[in-house]
Amino acid sequence: MKTNVLLTGRPGIGKTTIIRKALAALGLRSGGFYTQEIRGPKGRVGFSLNSLDGRSGILAHVDCDSPHRVSRYGVNVPDMLAIGVPALNEALAGSELIVADEIGRMEIFCPEFCEAIVRCLDSAKPLLGTLQARRDPFINQIRSREDVELVEVTNDNRDALPDIVVAKVRELLAR
């Protein structure tokens, strides 16, 4: 039985926007996190990590000195440990809906994050999130889980998806 809904698709297609619109329409007690671009005068310089309860930090940045790199960004594992992992654990303990935006290459540098994601996916609570389209062993494991419904975001369907996601989550909660 599908109990988790994960949006996937190319970067910049609007997955986070869809999740934020769906959350606003649902009005549920939700917990977890989302990521957001950090823009500088010459374009994107990094990504912030934001818990749904208001904590924020840096997921990755061009100026982050880290052994973990994705493209030109150093990945800030300490902020994932301080914000992302606790947000998931708290959502698992006290929310109706768990939000994980995003499960991708940057986030999975943190083993505790991967463990928290698996605990959340294994729980009876629905998880709404985004899954990077790029292939990776951990991401592939999530993609192949029988309890995960993958929804590909395209230019053609992205405007209709917030309502579709709302309906899917409501159906999961009604079971």
Image: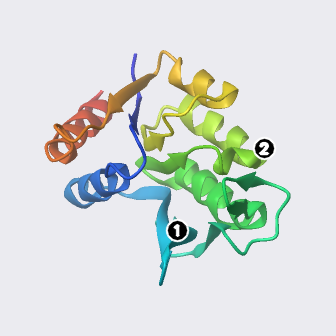
Residue lying furthest right: 67
Structure colour scheme: rainbow
Query: Where 56 falls versus 83 (above or below)?
Result: below
Label 1 is placed on what type of residue? Asn
Q: Secondary structure at mark 2?
A: helix
Quarter of the image with the C terminus in it: top left
Disc 1 to disc 2: CB gap under 8 Å: no
Q: Distance from label 1 to label 2 (Cα)?
A: 19 Å
Q: Nearer the viewer, residue 10 or 127?
A: 10
* Mark 1 lies on residue: 50
Query: Where 5 falls versus 70 (above or below)?
Result: above
| Visible residue check, residue 53 | no
Label 2 is placed on what type of residue? Pro
Q: Percent position (x, y) of residue 60?
A: 65, 64
Residue lying furthest bottom: 41
Q: Secondary structure at mark 1?
A: strand
Q: Residues within 10 Å of mark 2 (few under 14, many from 20)?
A: few
In terms of image quadrants, where is residue 174?
top left
Query: Where 151 falls versus 78 (above or below)?
Result: above
Q: Residues within 10 Å of mark 1 (few under 14, many from 20)?
A: many
Q: Percent position (x, y) of residue 34?
A: 48, 59
Q: Which mark is residue 38?
A: none
| Visible residue check, residue 112 | yes
Query: Where 2 falls versus 96 (above or below)?
Result: above
Badge 1 or badge 2: first in the primary sequence: 1
* Mark 2 lies on residue: 111
Q: Which residue appears at 62% of the width and 22% of the height?
A: 141
Relative to 112, is 155 on the left or the right?
left
Residue lying furthest front: 42
Relative to 15, is 165 on the left or the right?
left
